[in-house]
Image (tube, rainbow, N blue to C red):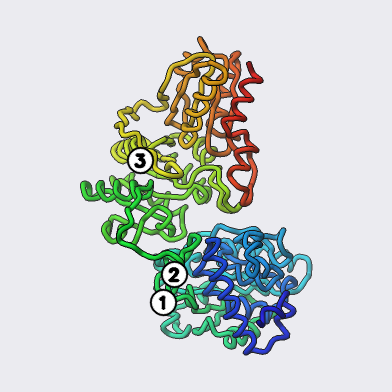
Amino acid sequence: MVLDRVNTPIDLKQLKIEELKQLAEEMRELIIKKVNKTGGHMGPNLGIVEATIAMHYVFNSPEDKIIFDVSHQCYPHKILTGRKEGFTDPDKYLKYSGYTAPEESEHDLFKVGHTSTSVSLATGVAKARDLKGESGNVIALIGDGSLSGGEAFEGLDNAAVLGSNMIVIVNDNDMSIAKNTGGLYSNLKLLRETNGAAECNFFKALGFDYYYVDKGNDINELIDVFEKVKDTSVPVVVHIKTLKGKGLKPAENNKEAFHWVLPGALDKKETSCEAVQETYNSITTDFILKKAKEDSKVIAIAAATPGAYGFTPEFRSKLGKQYTDVGIAEEHAVAYASALAKSGAKPILAILSSFVQRTYDQLSQDLCLNNSPITMPVFWGGLSNADATHLGAFDIPLINNIPNIVYLAPTCKEEYLKMMEWAVGQDKYPVAIRVPFGEVISTGVEDKTNYDEINKFQLVEQGQKIAIIGLGNFYHLGCKVKREIKDKLNIDATLINPKFITGIDTELLDELKGKHSLVITLEDGCVDGGFGEKIAKYYGPDSMRVLVYGGKKEFTDRVPLEQLYERYHLTVEHILNDVKKFF
């Protein structure tokens, strides 16, 4: 194998062109095998193999700085920069992150997992180089899908006037996670159709020199153009047309499904006999379809990640004009939804917990300051074993502390549906709903809560001495803790389902003072600035003791969930021991 002779980019430069082509096929086979075993980004990595080889063949990393956007296409880069064991040795498949990580290699400048950032980062790196009087190339690799993000435009706008070496490689496979949407893509299409010769050129209009490579998976052509722009003294865009999922027919034919796959994606065999399992995604889509049919003003909105919410092509087709994918532009999505609501429509904006972070200013100013009544289901919120770039533990402190918004935490299917129904039907508040994370829990009992009574907690079981307040996902942990306290300490604790994250039920909390000396709060997320801290603060002047359980304020990176629960005392055994110490 050619790959046996390649351990660093320096080794790559000793190969002949034909060997580079063979290397590309070997790398592609490794990626397919590894990702099918572990899960991960399949299509983006397969499409960028040749470009990665050509970049490392022409440029001199790490002296030349290569900065990946999102970095969900960095697997070929990792193979070539000393980390191929993570792809050749099954025992080390999980050794390296799925994203760029400076702690792994000097060839990675940034830990990156969110999109549209590369040009901004590269512009800063290039400016620092110029300030220090140094030399070297700075290369930003960004996909066409990432260009829909506002930060990408802001970066390009500033990079274009840098006046020194700055190379932006635009990897155009005519695809984001789902299909690209937005006016920019008509110009990219025009450039592809005219082999880059169209007079109307977005990049030239900004001030970049411009090169187009129609065969973006051809190593020869890529090397030729990279050698032309190497050591340039002006900002330049190299626009390459590639095939997402190249070399794997299912990924080429179904680009959306194979953007990111679960383990064993290539091993599954379709069978019509399999029962369709209900999920919170399917509950959400069924609800939206029903409401959209009843009311033409209902509109669903996604920001380039429709698959994460179960917004399948079929679902999107059924909604027709009652669906908008704004591209990778969560900030715009929030402002867009706010304006829709102010104008009489009923927007339902689905968003991932990890991505809601990008919208803070819009949530505060465009949405909550204007008190626009949108419905925003927040998916994947909670502690997890995710990569450091995709943690869902920070949405509660973020949303919880913005005025006007109501953030709700259902514990089951029935509560979720009632909250969605209330949110869409009311016109007083922006409403976010933290969609339960995990398998569907159904009580079979209709939720009759009047959610117009803001911040009214549900007293599920009256007890004494100890009160357990279990929020959302962790309400069920609270049920287990209550049983264990009864069995081991013979104390019948009070159990509370708060349902509201953004406020506290002061009347109920005051009532607890009479027969309780300890309150336990449980939340599936970061406690700093979170739900439990508000309970503890309220009881500050009183003798009531409060034990606040949740995650610490830290970036965890692929730490098994069981380890996190141990670290944060989020187990029945740990909580029971803490209670024993108290009494």
Label 1 sits on a secondary structure element that is: helix
Q: Quadrant of residue 117?
A: bottom right
Distance, label 3 to label 2, CA atoms, is 32 Å
Is 558 drawn above or below residue 497 in the view shown? below
Q: Amino acid at mark 1?
A: Lys
Residues packed near mark 1 inside 10 Å, few (<14), some (14 to 19) or many (20 plus): some
Residue 224, relative to residue 387: is it above or below? below
Residue, disc 2: 175
Which label belongs to residue 373? 3
| Place of residue 397 in the rendered image (x, y in percent of width and height, measured from the top left) | 54, 38
Question: Looking at the image, which is closer to me, 43 or 304?
Answer: 43
Q: Are dots 3 and 1 in contact, CB under 8 Å?
A: no
Q: Residue at x 39, y 27 (%)?
A: 454
Q: Quick one: quadrant of the C terminus?
A: top right
Task: Give the residue at the far top of this rendering.
Answer: 514
Q: Position of residue 531 (x, y in %)?
A: 53, 31
Q: Amino acid at mark 2?
A: Met
